[in-house]
Image: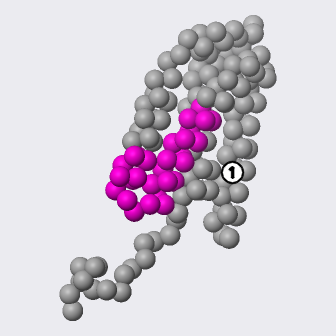
Amino acid sequence: MESNRLARRTGWACLLVGGLMLAPSVLLHCVPLALRILLRMGILGSVVGLALGGVTRTRRATSIYLGLLTAFFGGYLFLSMLDNAATKSLLLPQGTPRFLEGYPTLLRVGLFFVSIPYPFARFGTHTPDILLENSEVSGETE
């Protein structure tokens, strides 16, 4: 019960931060570009968060390594998407500071990392392992 409440709070916090990150796109007149970035980075970050959450739910080595490989591949895709031609298509209005040319890259990085925590909190297991009573299994000697 407590973990579901924590996951909901995490989800709302991620939505709030993501919405605040999208707000400057209205002033920069690049809402369609920002929504495309939101879609791509949101899906990619959610896949990474889901894979990392799945790693915490299993004890099988194969499943753990497949989850970590999926998360690594998602991180690799994220890094390969940073240098994209869509960044060059941002046309700034007159009088806008030049440092805002990096807004799409900042949006990509921020939305990727903001979309990871909710799937991890929702689908991951956040409890310690159960200690076994049998001393032979746990490796302890009396």
Q: What is the x, y in percent for residue 103?
A: 63, 22
Q: What is the x, y in percent for residue 21?
A: 69, 33
Can you say whether 105 is above or below 58 in the image? above
Q: What is the x, y in percent for residue 32?
A: 74, 19
- Tell me the magenta residue range: 41-68
Can you say whether 53 is above or below 136 in the image? above
Image point (54%, 58%), residue name: 124
Side (left or right) of 2 relative to 55: right
Can you say whether 36 is above or below 86 in the image? below
Q: What is the x, y in percent for residue 48?
A: 51, 42
Image point (45%, 54%), residue name: 55
Q: Is residue 129 magenta?
A: no
Question: Which quadrant of the figure has residue 33?
Answer: top right
Question: Which quadrant of the figure has residue 113?
Answer: top right
Which quadrant is the N terminus positioned in?
bottom right
The amino acid at mark 1 is: Gly
From the image, tell me which residue sits under label 1. Answer: 11
Image point (67%, 15%), residue name: 97
Question: Which quadrant of the figure has residue 101?
Answer: top right
Within 10 Å of disc 1 (Cα), the crowding (few <14, some 14-19, many 20+) is: many
